[in-house]
Image: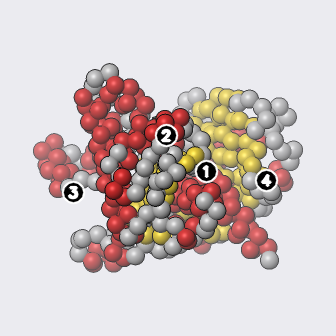
Amino acid sequence: MNILVVNCGSSSVKYQLIDMDQEFALAKGSVTRIGMSGAILTHKPHDRSEVKVTGEILDHIIAIQYVISILLSENHGVIKDKSEIHAVGHRVVHGGEKFSKSVLIDREVQREIRNLIDLAPLHNPHNIRGINAATKTLPDIPHVAVFDTAFHHKMPPKAYIYGIPYVMYKKYAIRRYGFHGPSHLFVTSRSAELSKGKLEDYKMISCHLGNGASVTAIENGASIDTSMGFTPLEGLLMGTRSGDMDPAVILHIMGREELSLHEANTLLNKHSGLNGVSGISSDMREVIESADEGNTNALLAFEIYCYRLSKYIGGYATAMGGLDHIIFTGGIGENSPRVREKTCEKMQFLGVELDKDKNSSVIGIESDISTPNSRVKVMVIPTNEELVIARDTLRLVNKAEK
Ligand code: ADP
């Protein structure tokens, strides 16, 4: 069975067509600059080189039609007929309290996801646009929604309730939700598999470090706490997001600089984090390069990044009363030995012993980077969120057919 996985952003669609018999991506790619001049379709079939096509792509429906055409095309395609796409898995960022697991999409589910726009105004509208576009283009096959938040659904109230009047939770559903669920699930399951055990057997901390970043504590196979909160702004320092800070700071700045809500939102989400502190870039590679050239603000941004991550790991080890695995994933987690080494620098007391030589040589590949004597395994595991989405889609489609 082939499953098309679709992840829609405001002006982009990322996709993969996965053959689920082999769990193998037949093709992957993206459409960017949708609705702008010079939209770009980048497509990589598994057995041929990448192609780029530019054109005018007005909306997500046309983008999905382009994706299907290239999947079918004679030169760059990987299937011969549309009927070889058997189901579509959609990434949906926010499932609120309503969706604790993936669901088959019908009109009612679409309405419920629309109702959640208030909780995720930056993400859910684009996901809904993707669902509309794909269900119109491929109306005869099942579509499944897989939520970023669902993996965190078993967190206990002590981890998800904020210290504000409880009535705000009741009235506006203000609580910690957590994100990056498919990634945390993929890397922790894989880490358990590599240790020849079950996810339920281990206490794990997974660090998803991409442009957005979150860290999650996993015990008894479930997320018990995670650093992102009501929105993906909370927690770690990120590429352009502030992460944790005293909420009074933003009230103060809004007063001093006479910022609107929208401007304050932009300040915290787009101009903060590595970018804001370093004044150089949101890209960790450039921050590290600049720090090495002597830029003190870049060095500070790097240090805050690792310091904050190491504090979360210490806190979560205490929350679980122990720790078996730390897992690094995402662009930074997979590719930056410097971030991994700095983060683990003071963790010997927790039983973490990093093999520094091994760590330096591991870039973008699955590996155990701890010493044989380390009580805690430190793993690098490239994430595969698309595969988690495809697996859930397959499971629900099979269940519906029974
Ligand atoms: P997204 O969250 O957009 O999917 P990625 O997971 O691709 O992002 O991660 C992007 C981040 O990974 C950027 O900060 C980039 O600098 C970082 N990154 C990629 N390669 C390296 C590397 N070799 N060293 C340090 N950081 C890296």
Residue farthest toward the front in the current orientation of the protein: 373
> What residue is rendered at 30% in x and 40% in y?
303
Residue named by callout 4 = 22
Of callouts 4 and 3, which one flags the residue occurring earlier in the amino acid sequence? 4
> What residue is rendered at 27% in x and 77% in y?
166
**Local crowd size for mark 1, using a 10 Å CA cut-off: few (<14), some (14–19), many (≥20):** some
* Residue 170 seen from this side: yes
Res. 384 mark: 1
Amino acid residing under circle 2: Asn
Q: How many numbered discs sit on the rendered protein? A: 4
* Residue 115 seen from this side: no
Mark 4 and mark 3: Cα distance apart in space: 48 Å
Res. 110 mark: none
Mark 1 and mark 2: Cα distance apart in space: 21 Å
In the image, taking residue 80 as reference, residue 311 lies left or right, namely left
Which element is circle 4 on? loop
Does the residue at mark 4 contact the one at mark 3 (Cβ under 8 Å)?
A: no
Of callouts 1 and 4, which one flags the residue occurring earlier in the amino acid sequence? 4
Residue named by callout 3 = 247
Residue named by callout 2 = 359
Residue farthest toward the right in the current orientation of the protein: 80
- The answer to whether residue 151 is above or below residue 215 is below
Amino acid residing under circle 1: Asn
In the image, taking residue 347 as reference, residue 259 lies left or right, namely left
Q: Which quadrant: the N terminus?
A: bottom right
> What residue is rendered at 60% in x and 59% in y?
195
Which element is circle 1 on? loop
Q: How is the image coloured?
A: secondary structure
